[in-house]
Image (cartoon, coloured by chain):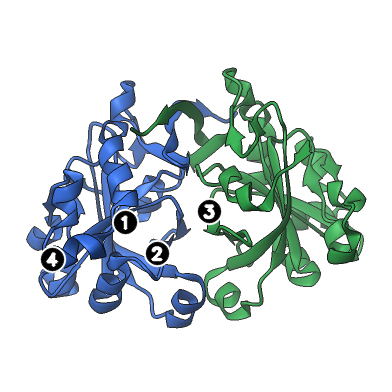
Chain colours: A green, B blue
């Protein structure tokens, strides 16, 4: 994975892929799927994502004030579905970890971020999901009423990375192989794969 | 176009297509492109969409408190690009109409909505874009601070329609022909077409 210039980070989400949301706090961590995400601003880059108040991830984000977004590949479909259906809270109550239950590996690229002065310890410890096309590390904006009323989290993207075989120089060049492309959830496990590129005249 | 059950309306946007945002007020109307949109709730269905404060559409929405979202087909790509780049304000100052300038036709399906008691005159007069895959008619939620701080509009979907050859019984079955599929903007006129359906195990 290679760093993505912050001015181009919105392009990682602009086409509307379903993402994995990750967070960690006080020795606990979780991962969930979220189709309801979008860019909110270009620079500094901001994002909006809906995180239901009943999720285990929500409590971790409320505590850590940060989260990760990982853009999964179609080849990870079974794991994405588990992330969207298994309850992190129920697993945690049994002493189980949802990354493990989904067959996902957590990584912490920000732990090695060379600009450590700008990242808090919690931000640097935020997990992201191994094997994804792209990662965005996000810091909550202080909008508690929006979160309380609409389960809607607004955040600034403070670091981003992408697999250079799929995204480089600010552009997607997704491999043609379906398993390597991003995915778009509709409902009930029905997804679309990201299709062919087209350029407007 | 056929009505879409409100409980299924979120599925029209769940896969992250770029949409056309439309609004009208006091004899003026406009259309713009918006990649930054997403569902916000299931039922009543709600949506979130970013509408820059400098757009002509923004003023119309602030006045009418309602807007339309239309999901365009790839065959409309040139018109979508014009909707995303031409200034409705500059056109209006010249006495020109942006629908005309983009080669788009406005329609008002809600004008014939049989449940008129629940729709205001402004809502029923809201234009939508002819030839699209789906339409959502939206009523602003009272979140003026969110709009002021983030250009972010939250709204309830009060009616929805879709082309039954592409979406029926709550499911997308997009024609295989690329020109008939929805589109996902990345940046600078580079889009992805919605690709193949895949079903999680």
Q: Nearer the viewer, residue B85 or A40?
A: B85
Q: Secondary structure at mark 3?
A: loop
Q: Nearer the viewer, residue B169 or B33?
A: B33
State which chain disc 4 sits on. B
Respond whether the residues carrying marks 1 and 3 are from the same subunit: no
Label 3 – label 2 distance at C-alpha = 17 Å
Work out which quarter of the rendered image holds the C terminus of chain A and state it: top left
Q: Is residue A54 visible?
A: no
Q: Which residue is mark 2?
A: B51
Seen in the picture, residue A117 relative to B162 is either above or below; the reply is below
Q: Residues within 10 Å of mark 3 (few under 14, many from 20)?
A: many
Query: Residue A83 placed where, x, y %?
Result: 68, 44
Q: Residue at x 11, y 63 (%)?
A: B95
- For residue B125, the mark is 4
Q: Earlier in the sequence, mark 4 or mark 1?
A: 1
Respond whether the residues carrying marks 4 and 1 are from the same subunit: yes
- For residue A36, the mark is 3
Query: Residue A168 placed where, x, y %?
Result: 66, 34
Q: Which residue is mark 1?
A: B6
């Amino acid at each position: 994975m290679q760093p993505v210039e912050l001015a181009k980070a919105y392009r990682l989400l602009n086409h509307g892929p379903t993402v994995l949301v990750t967070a960690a706090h006080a020795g606990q961590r979780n991962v969930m799927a979220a189709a309801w995400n979008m860019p909110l601003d270009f620079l500094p880059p901001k994002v909006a994502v809906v995180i239901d108040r009943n999720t285990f991830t929500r409590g971790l984000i409320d505590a850590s004030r940060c989260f990760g977004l990982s853009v999964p590949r179609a080849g990870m479909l079974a794991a994405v579905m588990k992330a969207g259906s298994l309850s992190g809270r129920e697993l945690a109550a049994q002493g189980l970890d949802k990354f493990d239950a989904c067959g996902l590996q957590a990584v912490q690229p920000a732990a090695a971020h060379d600009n450590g002065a700008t990242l808090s310890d919690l931000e640097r410890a935020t997990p992201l999901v191994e094997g994804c096309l792209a990662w965005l590390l996000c810091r909550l904006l202080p909008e508690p009423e929006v979160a309380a009323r609409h389960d809607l989290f607004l955040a600034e993207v403070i670091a981003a990375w992408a697999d250079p075989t799929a995204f480089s120089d600010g552009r997607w060049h997704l491999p043609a192989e379906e398993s390597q492309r991003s995915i778009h959830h509709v409902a009930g496990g029905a997804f679309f794969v990201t299709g062919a590129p087209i350029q407007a005249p």
